[in-house]
Image: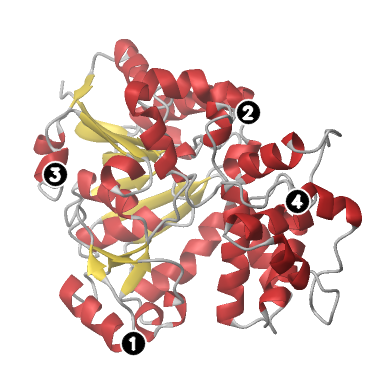
Amino acid sequence: MTPAARLSGAIDLLCAIQNAPHRPADAVANSFFRERRYIGGGDRRAISNITWDVLRSWRRLHWHLRADVKERHSDVSPRLLCGGMVLFSGKSLRDVQELFSGERYAPSVLTQREIVMLQGLEGEALTVERQPLAVRLEIPDWIMPYLQADFGDRLEEEMAALLESPSLDLRVNLLKSSRAGAMKALQREGFDVEETRYSPWGMRLEGRQPVTSSQTFRDGVVEIQDEGSQLIAAAIGAQPGQRILDYCAGAGGKTLALAMTMENRGQIVACDVSRVRLDGAVKRLRRAGVHNVMRHLLVSGDKWAKRREKSFDTVLVDAPCSGTGTWRRNPDARLRLTEQDIQELCVKQAHIIEIAARLVRPGGRLIYATCSLLSVENYKQVSAFLEKHPDYQWLSPEQGSALLPEALRQKAHFALTPYQHGTDGFFVSILQKQSP
């Protein structure tokens, strides 16, 4: 595809994302490309890169496009957003007009009004001091007090890191290979890969790379999983023969890592409220060679949990949350999140912890984790639970698992951020239920 055709593809994808405001952008993109199988892998990555660059620059682009035109628009078209992104990449307005040529597969010619709106951007920087801080940092105005309270002087550095493109992290499947063996296999297939800093199983590739088409991935030797997510599994330190509950398992990413540390011995029960997500785990479990996992769909009125109270050695609650720690990968999520969402999620998290705590045997452990950066979903949530449950206490990561690096074993919980650790944002706490 020509650069103009790729730009046209990005405009179409942004239109599809705007027309599905309640669907995550990556889900829309998957459907978009599935319906256009004629688009090759390199072109898909190029179109996705343009689209995600626009999503990461959403507030700043809108600020520029609205600030330099007297008429204030309630909406800015994907055409203008993509044209603005080209200008901010160092191109001239003339270059933009050549891309919008109207020729085969290229976007249609810019209107005079669009040209006028884009003229004010030429020679400008995307981020400028006169922008409000929330605009510069690409975060909703309402969330600023939460983040300022949690990060203080580090706010700008932490939020700036969320605007960077994420790495592609992989986890070796120790049921099939060692990390060194997996890295050699990937290198033979042409991938430039290095060890992750914290996870004992992690490997990192920069940028979007077609790792899912590699033989190493198809053989189940590696799995895509952010290093921070891997560290949740490391914090659990699951052992062969144990009985583990992954209470909010989703598509099974952490379930797979737990099965690996358990050497396929013992039992893992993967629960979720979504049949689609649980069904999606089947293929992954089969590819990884995992056979000690049972799946259970949680439904309203289900007596399953009541019948299994006090029966698990460890219960993992990877709770539904705001996902603020994943904004590098999901920049559209910051555009959809509301303060009401936070309030409703906190209620849901507290309810889930209450149910999950009943399933832990005396002497067992409850692991609470989120991919949120907000203390109201993390430390404050766990503290509130402990106030009501004196039979639970903090367990330091040092007591919990030897798989964690020394830097993360010093406190009763740990938080990861893109700025400090180069991972997605995660919070992990380990609680132990006292024996009678």
Which residue is rendered at x = 86% and y = 34% of the image?
71
> CA–CA distance between discs 1 and 2?
43 Å
Eye-nearest disc, 3 or 2: 2
Residue 352 higher or lower than 3, as above or below: above
Q: Check disc 2 and report the residue beneath it.
A: 338
Cβ atoms at labels 3 and 2 below 8 Å apart:
no
Residue 418 higher or lower than 399, as above or below: below
Q: What residue type is labelled 3?
A: Ser
Classify residue 395 by image quadrant.
top left
Eye-nearest disc, 4 or 2: 4
Dot 3: element: loop
Q: What residue type is labelled 4?
A: Gln
- Of callouts 1 and 2, which one flags the residue occurring earlier in the amino acid sequence? 1
Q: Check disc 1 and report the residue beneath it.
A: 189
**How many C-alpha atoms fall within 10 Å of the one at disc 4: few (<14), some, or many (≥20)?**
some
Q: Which mark is residue 401?
A: 3
Cβ atoms at labels 3 and 1 below 8 Å apart:
no
Cβ atoms at labels 3 and 4 below 8 Å apart:
no
Q: What residue type is labelled 2?
A: Thr
Q: Residue 320 carries which label?
A: none
Q: Position of residue 190 (x, y in %)?
A: 33, 85
Q: Which amino acid does label 1 sit on?
A: Glu
Dot 1: element: loop
The answer to whether 311 appears left or right of 411 in the picture is: right
Q: Residue 119 carries which label?
A: 4
**How many C-alpha atoms fall within 10 Å of the one at disc 3: few (<14), some, or many (≥20)?**
some
